[in-house]
Image: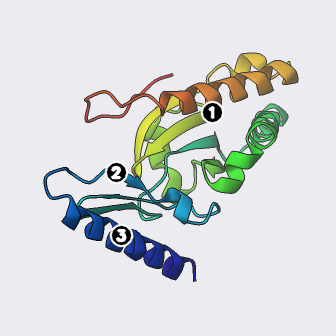
Amino acid sequence: MKKISIMIAALLILTAVTAGAADQKKDPAPLVNAKAALSAKDSTAAAVKADSLIVTTADTPAPKIIAYYFHGIRRCPTCRKLEAYSQEAVQTGFAEELKTGKMEWRVVNIEESPNEHYEKDYQLYTKSVILSRVENGKEAAWKNLDRIWELVGDKEAFVKYIQDEVRLMAADSMVPPAQSDSPTRGK
């Protein structure tokens, strides 16, 4: 039903613009923002300019941050505390982003065969929290939050550290990416 409404709105806008563009052959048609015509709950935006229709749909992956907690099979009380504090930081600080898919929380055992590649991908040597920024379906940047070990004794500072780093990573996604083929790697 939602797709039909979007298609009808886009066709109505296209019809209106092309009819108006026929009268204004010398002047290019102004950009018409059709976002208002679509449901406020829908993340799809349509824009029409002269004789072209540009539609951004849910097929275009939205940028997101993935917070990973990587662990092995053997887990001591401190390792479990790292996971619990990290999860709390993400869930309390970014509940809306988790609901909307702008952020994900993943707990990964790197000793299980399908996950072994993460050790090399992120240069892991111990239990770790990694933030990964994904843009256009590809990892654009990542960061190892290695201060978790020094802050595990202070829950408030630990949670603040995780939340501050997530905000920094998300803010970086607002800046146009540098002209590079490789994602940012870092500690």
The answer to whether 120 appears left or right of 19 in the picture is right
The residue under the point 58% across, 35% down is 130
Instruction: Say what secondary structure mark 1 lies in.
Output: strand
Three-letter code for the amino acid on which mark 2 is drawn: Leu
* Farthest-out residue, front: 23
Q: Dot 1, how many residues are within 10 Å of its Cα: few (below 14), some (14-19), or many (20+)?
A: many
Query: How far is mark 1 from mark 2, CA to CA?
Result: 47 Å
**Residue 113 location in percent, x, y?**
51, 58
**Residue 6 location in percent, x, y?**
49, 73
**The disc label shown at residue 16, or none:** 3
**The disc label shown at residue 118, or none:** none
The residue under the point 73% across, 16% down is 150
The residue under the point 47% across, 73% down is 9
Q: Nearer the viewer, mark 3 or mark 1?
A: 3
The answer to whether 49 appears left or right of 90 in the picture is left
**The disc label shown at residue 31, or none:** 2
**Residue 53 location in percent, x, y?**
30, 64
The residue under the point 68% across, 47% down is 97
Three-letter code for the amino acid on which mark 3 is drawn: Ala
Three-letter code for the amino acid on which mark 1 is drawn: Ser
Instruction: Say what secondary structure mark 2 lies in.
Output: loop
